[in-house]
Amino acid sequence: MSQAVESILYEHPLSEQVRTYLRLEQLFAIQTHLREQESTTCHVTALRNLWEILDCLDRGDIKGELIKELETQKLYFEQLEESPYIDALKLQRFLEQLNQLLDWLGKYRGKFGATLRSDRFIDMLKNRIRMPGGTCSFDLPELHQFLNQSFQYRQECLREWFSHLDGLAQCIKILLRLFRENGDFESVTSKQGVYQSSLSSQSNPQLLRVQLPSDSTYFPEISGSKHYFSIRFIEKVDNELKPVGDDFNFELAIC
């Protein structure tokens, strides 16, 4: 029996790069789940999800941004090697992992997903799979034939296609983990359903995390940048959304 969820976590990026990382993290998690399911419906959704990933990768120089950020993190952790308070073995393993990812990024040719886009089968799906009901056998007979292969064959194909992005998934996983570990949750007070604050540019915050009890009747609407942010809490009353008017405490982490 699954345990009851005690809290709901909301995250808000403070830069376009982190916004893209969070979106890709979610898409990668969906892909990993879907390809393990035996249902052909799940595998159609996995292929549609794959194109969502490719569309997301089309925006900006993600590879250059990742190399820059990972090199910054590597420099920071190398400076900790002489600290007597650091587990030297764990630090060395982590630095090796960073070096492996930087090596993978350096050897990756072209834009992320270019190999997948040039795959005839994946490219054939591009337009039809986005249409409502566009995956019918009369629209995509080749897809229909693929879906009637064994589960093991379909799963292996999905794993092979996604393997081109495994290194990218690892880069994003590590960076987001480091960002999240950079801020602890603190109890703060929302005044009449609103909380606002400025941010220190010296701390270089990357994202906000708001944690609410799972039985909360309200949710946060967050806006902000690396200099300032505002959180407004909204609740559903009589099937209408209205601003919360009471003071209350909630958990906030600035990472």
Image (cartoon, grey):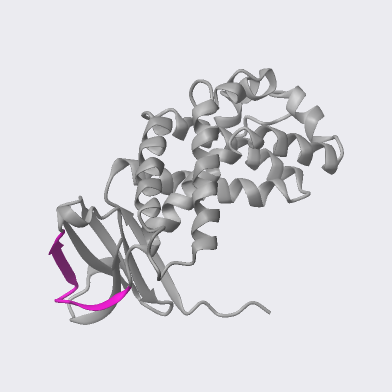
Query: What is the magenta segment's predominant secondary structure?
Result: strand
Which corner quadrant holds the C terminus? bottom left
Residues rendered magenta in the picture: 185-199
Marker count (numbered): 0
Residue ranking furthest to the right: 150
Residue displayed at 25% across by 58% down: 222
Residue displayed at 17% across by 69% down: 195
User: Up-down: is 17 above or below 76?
Assistant: above
Residue displayed at 19% across by 73% down: 193
| Residue 30 placement (x, y as % from top left) | 58, 49
Location of residue 84 by image quarter: bottom left
> 5 or 39: which is nearer to us?
5
| Residue 231 placement (x, y as % from top left) | 21, 64
Residue displayed at 17% across by 54% down: 202
User: Up-down: is 220 above or below 25?
Assistant: below
Regarding residue 131, the answer to whether it shows in the image is no
**For this view, does 227 lie left or right of residue 144?**
left
> 71 or 82: which is nearer to us?
82
> 177 or 18: which is nearer to us?
177
Residue 190 magenta-highlighted: yes
